[in-house]
Image (tube, rainbow, N blue to C red):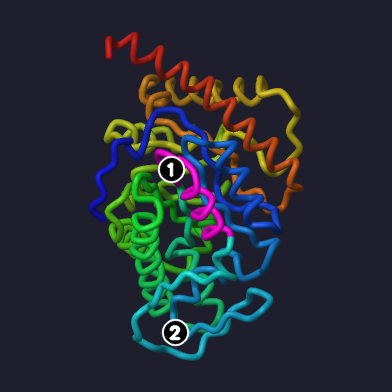
Amino acid sequence: MAAALDAPPLVPAVATAIGSLPHTDPRAAADLVLEAHPRFPAAPQLPMRTPLEGIVAQWARALPEVTIERDGSIAVGGVTNEPAVATFDAEAHGGLLAFLDAAASGPHPPRVKVQIAGPLTLGVALLRSGLPVAHAFRRGGEAARAWAIATEDLIEERLPESALVLFFDEPALVAWRSGDAPLEHEAAVDVLSGALAAPACPTGVHVCGAGNRRLALEAGPEVLGVEVGSDLVDDAEVLARHLDADGWIAWGAVPTDRPVGESVDPLWRALVGVWCELTRHGCDPVRLRTQSIVTPACGLAGHGPSQAERTMRLARELADRAHDQAIAARLTLGA
């Protein structure tokens, strides 16, 4: 990808989303993300519109041995080494394609976020469908790499003035923290790092709740997506190294597992409280603010449309406050 872009892919304290929304109308979902997060909209995934936009069904289809059923489940027809073929489909990628249409029809956003299934999550799905362990994760990696390259090409074609940040969604990382990992730690790092290295654009890994953040960081993403919580202190040392190496953190600061009110104040106090605790445990307080993105904690497909909209707006309000602190921190340093 060789597009000349004026806007940097990553800037301090902008809001974006994790990906999934509850909408059944792709254009309505696209309009929402472009309006709510104009500086960094996330292409929506719409599993309530069709199960074919589910995290596994949407991306495992690149493998010729995989059949996607109408209910979003997958069937694997044996072991093969045929290349993965990543082709965007109007039904399975309706949210993404509608987003590209909407974004291209007006001023291109300076940067966009697209999220695809990570290789470990695809590998776990293939393993559960009957493939041997080594083959399942190799094929999961091949599918993720194919989609990463195809997504980068698609954004360059459709939104040439927008910078892409590509996230790999890895809910399966929970297994590597719970002691139930189907693949040895170092091998899992290799699978994930291979996918992260496929595109030329900045990459991120979204770690759901109790997922293994250390494994994700060892794979080398530019951005780590985490849910804001007191347990982040457990990983303060590796988060500090990530920040010191100019890495970024996407703070999942708006809860998606419980109701949230209309006020941003308690969410802001929670985020600042975590920053203060991480600072006490060795993280640079300036980097915590200047190398930050703000998101909901997870996807919003399980919410109603109005709840999803409110959650996205709260993320933007948090990002505005974080932006003010980032600017103040830079001024303090004389930047």
Of all residues shown, which one is farthest toward the front? 105
Foreground disc of the pair 2, 1: 1
Residue type, label 1: His
Compared with 108, 215 (above or below) is below
What residue is shown at x 56% (from left), y 77% (from top)? 128
Q: Which residue is mark 2?
A: 64
Magenta residue span: 95-112
Q: Is residue 181 magenta?
A: no
Of all residues shown, which one is farthest toward the bottom? 78
Check the picture and name the quadrant holding the N terminus: bottom left
Instruction: Answer whether labels 2 and 1 touch (C-beta < 8 Å).
Output: no
Relative image position of residue 92 (x, y in whole percent) = 57, 69
Q: Quadrant of residue 191?
A: bottom left
Nearest the viewer among 5 and 80 is 5
Work out whether residue 206 can be spotted.
no
Residue type, label 2: Pro
Left or right, residue 106 beside residue 80? right
